[in-house]
Image: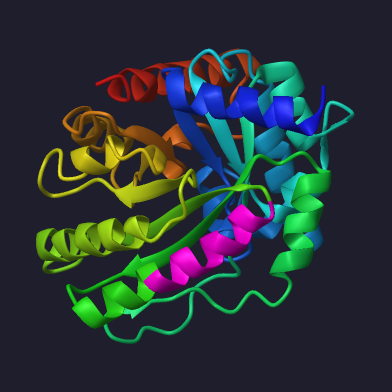
Amino acid sequence: MNALSLQTQQTRKIRTQPGFIAALDQSGGSTPKALAAYGVPAGAFKNDEEMFALVHQMRTRIMTSPGFNGDRILGAILFEGTMELEVEGRPTADYLWGAKRVVPFLKIDKGLAEAHDGVQLMKPMPGLAALLQRANAKRIYGTKMRSVIQQANATGIHAVVAQQFEVAAQILAAGLMPIVEPEVDIHCPDKAQAEDELKAALQQALAGLSAGQQLMLKLTLPSRDDLYAELTRDPRVLKVVALSGGYSRADGNALLARNHGVVASFSRALVEGLSAPQSDEAFDSELDAAIQGIYEASLT
């Protein structure tokens, strides 16, 4: 199968098939919290190498679980280290698509800069070109990058969108599908106002794309239902996905179901209730129920 036909198949799946995206991309800063929630205390590892080995075991357990497959899951977002590792003897991205028919994405940002103008931009990514080359070699379909909006500050919000689209242009030029993620903090004091400002900035930036170009948007579940409905119908947007943003799975699913055309891209909400000591039967059952609930909320 050549790269073009693979990309075409994966694009068609993202565009047309019901389902959601699993975010399995915790990085250095968030990994200890993810492991602790999974029942692995900080004392279980001595250094980063051991920590990432443990989190890969957790991710492998999720990806190899019977309920984790392309019937209900469109794609999975991976941490850079996960892309370089294997699942059941196959490179992770090859396993996801080849064994599960789940489209592989890669988290590419290097974390957040200090807050300024009510937002946190992404830190510089000097190695981006090389990382995109590696992603292509590993048969990654697309990428994800996160900024955070903490206040309804028009200057900051427009800076976030400008930076996201500047990086998205590099990703598109490398032949990959960018997921633009300007997260609005769910504790933002003027969340609805920030979201209105963000929507306007996104629409303006989308208008600047070249003919035929598409990207994906990953947005916080909005305070006003169906705020992003226009974006779900925009031909320049392949898919609008929603982050859980700290909401519980139950609350995230309830909010998601009220936003038509938007599907989930949950991380913490997906793995809620999973733990290392669980038997495989209990683990698989818990994960299957979580996948089903998120899938159903993504159907509206």
State whether residue 114 is above or below residue 207.
below
Q: Is residue 98 magenta?
A: no
What x and y, as percent, mark residue 51?
72, 56
> Which secondary structure type mostly characterizes the magenta part of the structure?
helix
Rendered image quadrant of residue 206: bottom left
Residue 279 in the image: state x and y as whole percent: 62, 19
Residue beneath the point at 69% across and 77% down: 126
Residue 294, quarter of picture: top left
Residue at 79%, 65% (x, y): give it: 130
Q: Tell me, yes or no, if residue 45 can be seen here.
A: no
Residue 212, percent from left and from top: 48, 43
Q: Is residue 247 left or right of residue 145?
A: left
* Left or right relative to 64: residue 146: left
The C terminus appears in which quarter of the rendering? top left
Q: Quadrant of residue 262?
A: top left
Where are the magenta residues, as a range? 162-174
State whether residue 222 is above or below residue 59: below
Q: Position of residue 164 (x, y in %)?
A: 45, 66
The mark total stands at 0
Identify the residue shown where x is 36% and y is 40%.
240
Q: Nearer the viewer, residue 58 or 245?
A: 245
| Position above or below: 299 against 62 | above
